[in-house]
Image: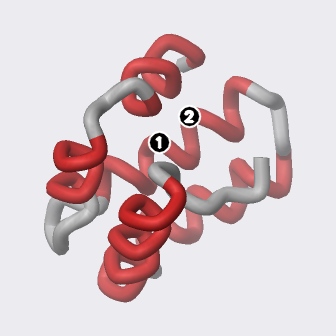
Amino acid sequence: MDELVKTIDSLPKLVKIILALPFLDIVWAVYRLCKSLSKNNALGIVLAILMLFFCPTILWIVDIITIAVMDKVIWID
């Protein structure tokens, strides 16, 4: 899990933005889940699972903005 998080963090900004587009944003939902799993954050794991199923339709906009501005996605970890 840790290696997946490090690999995605090291991607170029353009690739991160492409992965944040609708229908590909599931990558970021899985990333959030893996990040919380690697840090054993119970709240993060529950939220990531809920977001995996309910939020990808609207979260892609937030992901694109945060990647463009801060070069990372926002998460509680």
Q: Nearer the viewer, residue 8 or 68?
A: 68
Q: Which mark is residue 72?
A: none
Where in the figure is residue 9, as x and y percent of width and height?
A: 45, 31
Q: Which residue is mark 1?
A: 31
Q: Are marks 1 and 2 in contact (CB under 8 Å)?
A: yes
Q: Nearer the viewer, residue 56 or 16?
A: 16
Mark 1 is surrounded, within 10 Å at the Cα level, by few (under 14), some (14 to 19) or many (20 or more) other residues, namely many
The local secondary structure at tag 1 comes to helix
| 67 lies above or below 71 | below
Where in the figure is residue 72, as x and y percent of width and height?
A: 50, 51
The local secondary structure at tag 2 comes to helix
Q: Which residue is mark 2?
A: 34
Residue at 40% in and 52% down? 28
Whole-angstrom CA distance, mark 1 to mark 2, is 5 Å
Residue at 77% in and 57% down? 76
Residue at 83% in and 56% down? 43
Q: Is residue 42 left or right of residue 62?
A: right
Q: Is residue 47 left or right of residue 71?
A: right
Mark 2 is surrounded, within 10 Å at the Cα level, by few (under 14), some (14 to 19) or many (20 or more) other residues, namely many
- The kind of residue tagged 1 is Tyr
